[in-house]
Amino acid sequence: MRHLWIALLLAAPVLADAQGPLDEYVAQGLRQNLGLRQQALVVTQREAALREARGNFLPSATLNARHTNVSGQVVNLGELINPAFAALNQLTGTQDFPTDIDLRLPLRQETAIRVAQPIFQAELVAGYQAASAARDAQAANFGAAERGLAAEIRSAYVNHLKALRLVELRAATRAVLEEQVRVMSRLVDAGRATPDALSRARGELSEAQQREAEAAQIVSASAQSFNMIVGRDLVEPVEVLSDSALGLDALPSLDEALAAGRGGREELRALEAAGRAADAQRRVARGSFLPNLAVAVDYGIQGNEYRFTSDADFTLVSVVASWNLFNGGRDNARVQQARLEAERYALQSQDAERGVELQVRLAWQAAAVARQAIGTAEAQRDAADRTWQLVSRRAEEGLASPLELSEARVARTAAQLNALFTTYDYYLRRVELDRAAALYPRTTP
């Protein structure tokens, strides 16, 4: 049942395609996010409202009890019956007829059980359909929030990996500059380089150390931000994955992404369900033009005393029909309002479909361009690395000036940074494509 699925989802949402630590982080974040849990409670609330609407089809049983203290001038049927019975006694010469009857209305007590069953009431069916559509709309909104949170968690993790790779690159650059300072010191001692070249190398080393410290701070900040989103302790260590373990290398075709977006985006399902709810409200309003039919059975006891005997109980069977013939045109107005609301949702759904298509197209194009740029950036990095190695060997032999060595090193670092940023920019755009095209996550009911 749907409400059981919501309860399980509240307890522990699980990714059907969970294959690694990142999926487990996403599942943990979906499970512990307070905002998402609030929305899950709203879905459960809508499920309870649906059960309430379903209960309207079933019979109802009520126990009604009344006890009245009778005093003062009230209707007493005995005042009418006693004289007639006295006349009968005189005519017959007997005392067969009682003349002290006390039958004041209302009777002191009446206790009865009423069982009522609707036979035909058009509003009940339409009301149930409206409650079902409202539940579906809220469940779809919950799914959209879940998908957005999953994308946020994955993006935060990619940014953390990006910061870690940046620290590694800064550390490698620092090591290169330390070696450069060592080489320059040796060349100065040998008289093959001037002291200003050594000073420049030491200055570049100081700058590299500062850059490395800044990158380390970014790593700490990104880890804490990631833990905050997932709902973990802020200082808890984050498991580091290889780029291939992220599962973001492949890029689906545009047609596949568009088809997935049209079929999987929860926002479209929410609007479709909202349209069904509006249409059901229209049927609720139209149901007021039809008659209502119900059956009621009353069984109980009544009298001036409580007596549970066969001559004190009663049974009533009632067939109740009602038909609203005219109420000032209010029903027509309600029908028109619901019809216009359904038309509004239909237009909104068409606009949302076009919006989803645009989001998927833009996300796919951005990911495709970023993925294509990776090859160019890696080629530039490899070329800069070969240039650096060549200039470095020439500098050690005294054939290249310190300025040439510095320029080659700066170009190499810039190319490495560009390759790093280009790669992780693609991963981030790929995550956005997953969100826009509803490619991730897949949750189990």
Image (cartoon, helix red, strand yellow):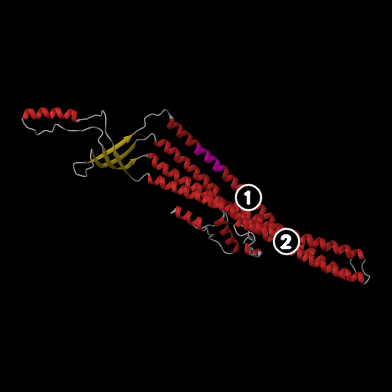
Residue 29 is left or right of residue 388, and the answer is left
On screen, residue 366 above or below 296: below
Q: Quadrant of residue 243?
A: bottom right
Q: Quadrant of residue 223?
A: bottom right
Residue 143 at x, y percent in the picture = 54, 51
Residue 155 is left or right of residue 132, and the answer is right
Visible residue check, residue 264: no
Mark toward the start of the polypeptide (1 vs 2): 2
Write down the residue under mark 1. 361
Residue 441 at x, y percent in the picture = 56, 57
Q: Is residue 348 magenta?
A: yes
The three-letter amino acid code for the residue at tag 2 is Ala
Query: Which quadrant does the N terminus fall into?
Result: bottom left
Residue placed most toward the observer, 390 or 199:
199
State the SS at label 1: helix
The three-letter amino acid code for the residue at tag 1 is Arg
Residue 73 at x, y percent in the picture = 26, 28
> In this view, which residue lies farthest toward the right?
191
Asked if the residue at tag 2 contacts the one at tag 1, i.e. Cβ–Cβ closer than 8 Å, the answer is no
Between the C-alphas of marks 1 and 2, the distance is: 36 Å
Write down the residue under mark 2. 216
Q: Is residue 84 magenta?
A: no
Visible residue check, residue 352: yes
- Single out the mark in the foreground, 1 or 2: 2
On screen, residue 98 above or below 230: above
The residue range painted magenta reads: 341-350
Crowd tier of the residue under label 1, counting other residues whose Cα lies within 10 Å: few below 14, some 14–19, many 20 or above: some
State the SS at label 2: helix
